[in-house]
Amino acid sequence: MGTGGAKAVVETRDLRKSFGTNEILKGIDFQVLPGEVVSVIGASGSGKSTFLRCVNLLEWPSSGEILYHGRDVLERGYDINRFRTHLGMVFQQFNLFNNLNVLDNCVIGQVRALGEAKAEARERAMGYLAKVGMDPYIDAKPRQLSGGQKQRVAIARALSMEPEALLFDEPTSALDPEMVGEVLAVMGGLAESGLTMVIVTHEMAFARDVSGRVAFMDGGVIAEEGSAAQVFANPNKERTKEFLARFHAG
């Protein structure tokens, strides 16, 4: 679980989420420390995406705490919009604005949410688009891009907000297989740069090779958690062993 709650960028305590009578999250204790890369793995329906969406308050938890640098963001009066600017989110379906070109997709959030001047926002966006290899496409509209290119733009957009941590919700699952590698390569580079990352993913080899820590979710709880090496090579729980047996990660 890492050490000492106050050191965590984000921590959840007994986080629960129900939709009607269906309890999806059944008490999640989780934290991510500065510079850590944590992958969240598990079968479809185990609650991984709901958990990530609760952390960023795209879904409102039913109960529990979400601590950002030790303070519960669910407290009355907490500036939730400001909190969201500290946690970038990269979605499965890209969520780009189809009427805006690539550059403006990466500028609009900086101007509207952060109050940046347009010139500075454009300069910052250009830097991050170059980082993901999409600077030649600044005038293109999303419909002119491949899925892999759209996801790289979405990553640049999230980085342009200069968040403290990036959350990835199955960022490659909507991509054709030949495009997965280009997105994982960008994410691997970000991990090496020391960015704090929480990644919900089905890409087991990537989770094993890039994460410092892995959390295996099963039935709405974190069933097992540990270093990537330990979880993949020597899982403790029978459910983890069964799940990983389906993925021969090479």
Image: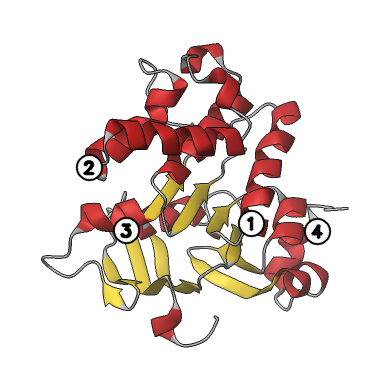
**SS at circle 3:** strand
Mark 4 surroundings: few (<14), some (14-19) or many (≥20) residues within 10 A: few
Up the image or down, 24 lies above or below 26; here it is above
Q: Which residue is mark 3?
A: 18
Disc 1 to disc 2, C-alpha distance = 28 Å
Residue drawn at (46%, 58%) of the image: 165
Q: Considering only order in the chain, which callout, 1 or 4, is on the residue closer to the N terminus? A: 1
Which one is in front, 17 or 180?
Answer: 180
Q: Callout 2, which amino acid?
A: Gly
Dot in front, 3 or 1: 1
Q: Is residue 202 left or right of residue 55?
A: right
Q: Residue furthest left?
A: 77
Q: Is residue 21 visible?
A: no
Q: Callout 1, which amino acid?
A: Ala
Q: Considering only order in the chain, which callout, 2 or 1, is on the residue closer to the N terminus? A: 2
Dot in front, 4 or 1: 1
Q: Which residue is mark 4?
A: 245
Q: Callout 4, which amino acid?
A: Ala
Disc 4 to disc 1, C-alpha distance = 26 Å
Q: Is residue 214 visible?
A: yes
Asked if the residue at tag 3 contacts the one at tag 2, i.e. Cβ–Cβ closer than 8 Å, the answer is: no
Disc 3 to disc 1, C-alpha distance = 32 Å
